[in-house]
Image (spheres, rainbow, N blue to C red):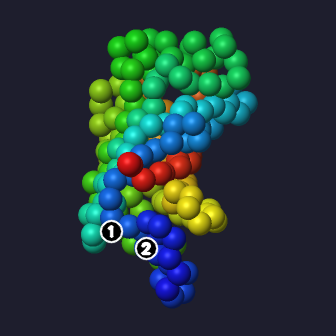
Amino acid sequence: MTTTPGIQLQPGGQPRLAAGSWRVDPAQSQASFAARVAGRPVRGRLPLTGGVLIAEPIEDSTARLAARASAVSTGSGVLDRLLTGPGFLDAGAFPEITFRSERLTRIPAGWRAVGRLQVKNTEYDLACQLDLDLPGARPGDLPRIIIASSWVIDSRWVTTQWVPGLGRRIVMTCSFYLEPEM
């Protein structure tokens, strides 16, 4: 068995994470999205914060991720103001978008987190596939974990306004770096 502080690799390469509290590194973590509006792709991102509690057994682990609705970045100031405004995310009234996991399940392709996504004070059931990466660490370095997840949300969760050509599906991807809480 190979060990790195906080991470153990079982025979066959399956990682086993040390129980404890981990924090999301906001400088390296983000949620990104892609949607079609008027036949054109729109991409953007939001920085993530939050924390993960890795439990024993690992299926009892929990996570809470949060994104500031006002921090949407598409590369277009006009579009960012539209998305954060009252017709979409309404960041003034609903400053945070959150995901809270309720269950972690092992599936043939890896892991799936099941939980609740809260957008504009309304909760939605959500399941997302998780991919785990354990970047190589030098002796003395803090252990780091990179988790990537993806899911699809319904555009009606974000706006009830009719937007010409807005597709119903918004593809979301999260990439978050975890560090042990000290």
Sooner in the amino-acid sequence: mark 1 or mark 2: 2
Above-or-below relation of 162 to 39: above
Residue situated furthest front in the rendering = 140
Name the residue at 73% across, 30% down.
40
The type of residue carrying mark 1 is Ile
State the SS at label 1.
Answer: helix
Left or right side of 158 for 169: right
- Marking on residue 153: none
The one nearer the camera, 68 or 125, is: 68
The type of residue carrying mark 2 is Arg
Label 1 Cα crowd, 10 Å radius (few <14 / some 14-19 / many 20+): some
Whole-Å distance between the Cαs marked 1 and 2? Answer: 9 Å
Rendering coords of residue 87 (x, y %) = 47, 14
The one nearer the camera, 77 or 28, is: 28
Above-or-below relation of 76 to 156: above
Residue at which label 1 appears: 58
Q: Is residue 55 visible?
A: yes
- Which quadrant would residue 114 be assigned to in this image? bottom left
Nearest to viewer (mark 1 / mark 2): 2
Name the residue at 44% across, 12% down.
86
Q: Is residue 145 visible?
A: no
Mark 1 and 2 residues: CB-CB less than 8 Å, in contact? yes
Name the residue at 29% across, 64% down.
55
Residue at which label 2 appears: 16
Left or right side of 167 for 181: left
The one nearer the camera, 64 or 82, is: 64
Above-or-below relation of 21 to 66: below
Rendering coords of residue 28 (x, y %) = 59, 41
How many tags in the picture? 2
